[in-house]
Amino acid sequence: MASLLPPVGMEVFRCFTAVSKEVVQQRHEAEVKERKAWKHQKASEKNLTKPARHLETGKSLPFIYGAPPPQLLCTPLEDLDPFYQSQKTFMVLSKGNIINRFSADSSCYLLSPFNPLRTLAIKTLLHPYPL
């Protein structure tokens, strides 16, 4: 019997790598092909999954997932929400376990998600500055 609760611990938080980017790309292409195969647009809208409300961008990570290790804060992670697993996005947790999502496509057609300049820009954007 499948558990209704999500897994907790380190196995939940996986770093976003080039391999995981390819998997997301394949899922996205499969979803696009599936949408093209459907003839009726209304039928396809009913079958689409919706984002989880507790994993929305800007909200704090629910306690059920546990506390992420400090070394994984402000680093690209694979998304926990099944809706976004087929989208071209990755998740970044900032201080306070706030969920942020960024596009996995190249930014400005030049900077991949793994480019050091883009990584530095994400860390700078999410850095908690004193008020």
Image (tube, helix red, strand yellow):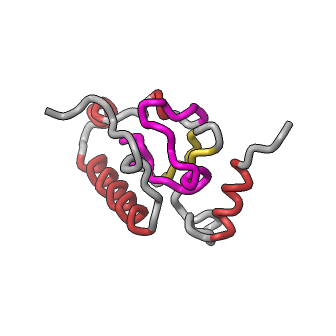
Residue 57: x and y in percent read 56, 37
Q: Position of residue 25 (x, y in %)?
A: 39, 61
Q: Is residue 78 left or right of residue 106?
A: left
Judge whether residue 76 is colored magenta.
yes
Residue 71 vertical placement versus 97 (above, below): below
Quick check: can you spot residue 81? yes
Q: Residue at x 64, y 63 (%)?
A: 119
Label the magenta part by its dominant secondary structure: loop
Magenta stretch holds residue 83: yes
Nearer-the-camera pick, 44 or 23: 23
Q: Residue at x 42, y 31 (%)?
A: 64
Camera-side residue of 122 and 130: 130
Choose top left, top right, bottom left or bottom right for residue 122: bottom right
Of the pair 42 and 31, the residue shown nearer to us: 31
Q: Quadrant of the N terminus?
A: top left
In the rendered structure, the answer to whether residue 22 lies left or right of residue 89 reads left
Magenta span covers which residues?
58-85
The reply, left or right, for residue 108 in relation to residue 54 is: right
Can you say whether 1 is above or below 13 in the image?
above
Q: Against 106, is 71 above or below? A: above
